[in-house]
Image: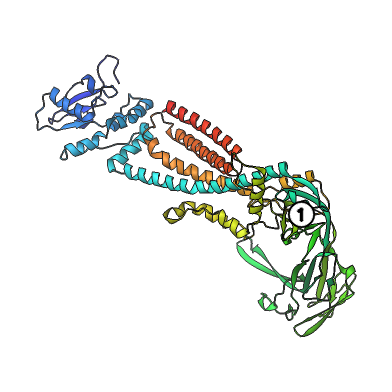
Amino acid sequence: LRSATGTTVEKCCRCTSGVVGWSVSGQCRFCEGTVLSSINVVPTCVWQSSSFKGAQSCAETCVDLLGGSANLVALVETEVEAMQVPTLSDGEGAALAGSWPSLGQPPALGIARDAPNAVSVLLEIASAGGAAAAVAADYEGGRAPKQAFFLLLFGSLALCVAIPILWFGERTFAAVESVLAGARSDGIEVTGKEVDSDFDGCLVHVQGTLRASSAVFDRYFPMVKFENGCVKLRTTCEVFRWIETAEEAFEGPSGRNFKIDYRYHQAWSATFESNVRFKDPIGHSNGVRPSVPLGTKVETCGKVMLDEYAVPPEMLDALSCFDSAADRIRDTVVAYAGGQKLVFSLESSGYFMHRAGGGSEGRDQVGDLRLRFEDIRDGPATAFALQRHAQGQATFAPYRPIRRRLCSWSEEQERDALLKEAEKSGTIIREEMLCPTGGPFGCLCCCCNLASRFLPRDVDDPSCRCLRPQTGSVMYFRQGHETLQDTLLKVAISRSTRQVWNMRLLGLGIGFVGLCSFFCPFQLHHDADGIGWIRMAVSALTVDLLVWGGTNAVAHCIYRPAIGFSIMIAVLCFAGLFIHGSLALF
């Protein structure tokens, strides 16, 4: 900072009061307009000089140059005052603010320590110094170290939360991808009439005939019994009753009056509700509760075969195409419940009706009951699951992701690992998904453990009939014949990435906020060009993506080591480029 004539902008000033000091702007503001004399400073007292020896030392030098005595107080005009000089541009002001770290400490603190009885220095915040001015205010009150500590602490805690969330999501994604890759490459099409034990531990595709080998009956209606040919029996019992509905509405010219309008109608329902609970019970009586249980219940055959394969019950839960079984039942069904004999007669609608309310066909009355029987009969079916033998009988098991090694991994070892994984219960799998960290560090995995608690108790949820999104297991079963290609397509389509992306976005968001908080104290000291906040956000986003990539690589290393190491190499290369660019930038 030198003027055009070669003289220094910085001055040594002597006030009429006898006070001598060093002024970075040359205006000797600490004299408050009563300047006795001022001279140029020595080269080592030029603000931006590489040999600049410090504000306090320059103030003491000015005392020597102007012939001050030992009892005079040496004042230093602060760099914040320098930013108020009209001749300095905003960029120059920011450059001055950026040079603070080289001073070791703000001169105002040096004055307060070395001359406690001197005139107090007023730190005025200038607009050219944005972030740097904020740091000056913090230094004045001693708040900067405290704020930096809390920002670093918050950032560290946020990262401890974000990383387990990312880990849980990426591990789920890696497991699903591992199973899909194995299904495409290892799926074998076999015949169900001749079972080969050499295929135990293999993912097999079987097309055969579904056959019920034991009787199925309804426990509440024992007259409804099928000795054979019925895989599943579904019974639905409903009552005709009054139903109350509530509608919300606004009344009045301005629509400010809120009102709930209760309405009543008659309809069939699988639940019973007494009119005592109605808003207007008069004239809407539903009578007494029926003695037979209402709702829908399903009975499954105890032994079902797909050619020579025994079908486990969890696979039968996937069958849902029911047809009416009225043609296999007598016209009258009798039930004994609550000491009463209830007779249900088949009507043209396909329902078995008990006219307790006195109604007739086509004219239902409150209190009438109706039954509907539906079944799934023997027929063609397709299975796609892991083959194994249990008690000498060929059966199916879930095809689940397994931990593989990068080398020394034979086909026999993989089959043994698949069979061992298939024998685990849902409870064991859920426990394995929990982090093993305990003691004082157990809280670091609380997010991962909490997320795993939302999994169903049976991780092989039968409602997910193709690919179980929680564990990535395959246990496919369908009525009718399908080719292996069609089955693979349905398994791939059933893959749901919503849970994975929810975990990713949550983890990335928390990680980004934590990294911004972590980098904030460093940004405040390096905002010389006014774009420090943008640089900090870009750096936080880049590091956040690197953490995500590293988590993804580690998760893939568990199930598919070759893919995991490839991702890890790509992440390391990108990290190297980022570090190199950061060093060049800063």
Q: Position of residue 490 (x, y in %)?
A: 75, 47
Against 365, is 385 above or below?
A: above
Q: 564 or 523: nearer the eye?
A: 564
Left or right for 518, reference 121:
right
Image location of residue 304, percent across then percent down:
79, 62
Disc 1 residue type?
Answer: Phe
565 shown above or below 40: below
Q: Does residue 350 appear left or right of residue 242 in this picture?
A: right
Q: Which residue is mark 1?
A: 477
Say which element carries label 1: strand
Give percent across and percent down for residue 369.
80, 75
Work out which residue is located at the far top of the displayed protein and give it: 5
Q: Nearer the viewer, residue 158 or 202?
A: 202
In the rendered image, the quadrant that contains the C terminus is: top left
The N terminus lies in which quarter of the figure?
Answer: top left
Residue 304 appears left or right of 499: right
> Which quadrant of the structure image shows residue 405?
top right
Specify few, some or many for label 1: CA neighbours under 10 Å numbering under 14, 14-19, or 20 or more.
many
Q: Is residue 153 left or right of residue 393?
A: left
Q: Could you tell me which residue is drawn at 50 percent across and 37 percent down?
A: 541
Residue 112 location in percent, x, y?
20, 39
